[in-house]
Image (cartoon, rainbow, N blue to C red):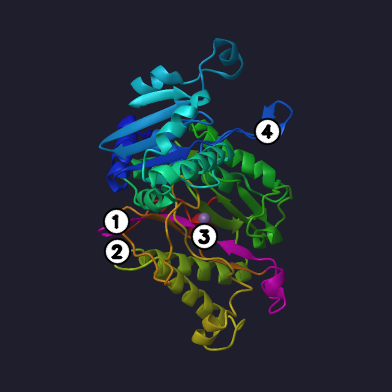
Amino acid sequence: MKKISQKEFQNRRKNLFSNMEENSILIVSGEEEKVRNNDVNYEFRQSSDFWYLTGIEEPEALLILIKKDSEKYILFTQEKKVEEEVWTGYKIGVEKAKSFYLADLAYNTNQLDKLSELLFSCEKIYYNLGSSKKLDDLIFTGLDNFKRIKSRTGIPNPLIIDPSILIDSMRLIKTHDEIEVIKNAIDLTEKGFIEAFKYSAPGKYEYEVQQIMEMEFRLGGSKRNGYPSIVASGKNSCILHYIENDQKLTKDTLILIDAGSEWDYYSADITRTWPVSGKFTSEQTDIYELVLEANTKAIEECKVGNSINDPHIKALTILVEGLKHLKILDKSTDEIIEEKLYFPFYMHSTSHWLGLDVHDSGKYKDRDENFTEFQEGMVLTIEPGLYFGDMAQKISKKYKDIGIRIEDDILITKSGPKNLSEKIPKSIKELENFY
Ligand SMILES: [Mn+2]
């Protein structure tokens, strides 16, 4: 299955260079190890921005791009020491940083003084203050020194700019290869869901269903999940980020799974809800059909010319009209939306960007509240839901403990929305067929 090539990482750096201003330097730091206890660290995952630009998984590495007269790509990676590699595995080292990862120059992370020299030779520094204590210190010390000599040079401090102003908009538009990789993550997630549909039954535990599903992710080669799986049966389905996953499935209730495998750092994000006993009750059917209609109609709104707000308004309007039809809310649709009377039943938004992060980077609206318009290559989720948990039960008891969300992953194309997760069953008929 496809993975992102070094050629593609190189193209991304080229694009980034072309967006950087002349006489500037850009720094993106890799993730640092976090201690769990004593000499055991938390499982390492590279920072998404650093991965996006390098494809390097080593902790504490640094990427530097300098655009001044020419363009230079510099890497700092951990020093290669045989005595340490025998404990923690092979390091990249300066040779491979150049030969395989295509850096023009490479240093060890214990040579950071090289970076101080480079930093203050540019007018602008793209750096996300606060992203690394070590780099923050280095930059503040440098600024201090710079100020001291200002009385003689007259040169003002370099301007510090958040690099996400450049990187986020690049990550928002997916390339052909990125879309292929996201499809792989979704295909593995589909396999997991199919096994979960088949396995779930009264008497099984949520964690068992989770294991059966995630085994498919792992057997397919996915290293980890894009986020902790939500496996929520019965009233747990009304808790949006329920991850305890330790309850027994009981008959005539629903089970909601929100999960996504990660493939080559890209995440899927799918939700399906189905009946534990294999048959939707009439109350469950009322709510399920409504959420499904909101899901399918909102997907149709994912087209060039619309904005990220259009599918949300569509889904919300359908859900509100449905709640009126079921006699749960009784004001006009406009009033219900204006006064947010739907909130106890639907308290989250319909979409988020999807990519290296499950809630991927990219702007939703600008400071003047203009929503981002869809462009070819954007990938987002459509995930309407209705929840009859504690907030809703103050208004209506009839649908007590029913929580339903249906989530698909959508690619914006010139010819309309492409539902990348359309193969994962979601009609009542298809879901009941697993029993
Ligand atoms: Mn989601």
> Which residue does the numbered mark 3 point to in the structure image?
406
Distance from Cα at disc 3 to Cα at disc 2? 23 Å
- Judge whether residue 396 is colored magenta: yes
Q: Is residue 188 visible?
A: no
- Residue 187: x %, y % from top left: 44, 42
Nearest to the eye among marks 2 and 4: give it: 4
Can you name the residue that lies furthest to the top here? 82
Q: Which amino acid does label 1 sit on?
A: Glu
The residue beneath circle 4 is 35
Q: Which of marks 1 and 4 is nearer the N terminus?
A: 4
Residue sitting nearer the eye, 89 or 387: 89
Question: Which percent across, then down, holds residue 36?
Answer: 70, 34
Spatial separation of the CA atoms under disc 2 and disc 4: 45 Å
If you read the primary sequence from the N terminus, does the residue marked by circle 3 or circle 1 appear first? 1
Residue drawn 41% across and 66% down? 366
- Asked whether the residues under the numbered discs 3 and 1 touch, taking CB atoms below 8 Å apart as contact, a structural biologist would say no
Residue position marked by numbered label 2 in the rendering: 304
Q: Which amino acid does label 3 sit on?
A: Ile
Residue range of the region highlighted in magenta in the rendering: 389-416
Q: Is residue 271 magenta?
A: no
SS state under label 1: loop
Residue identifier under label 1: 376
The residue drawn where x is 32% and y is 32% is 72
Count numbered badges in the picture: 4
Image position of 297 with respect to 378: above or below: below
Dots 2 and 4: beta carbons under 8 Å? no
**Circles 2, 1 touching at the beta carbon (< 8 Å):** yes
Mark identifier at residue 368: none
Closer to the eye: label 3 or 1: 1
Q: How far is the residue under mark 2 from the one under mark 1?
A: 7 Å
Amino acid type at circle 2 is Val
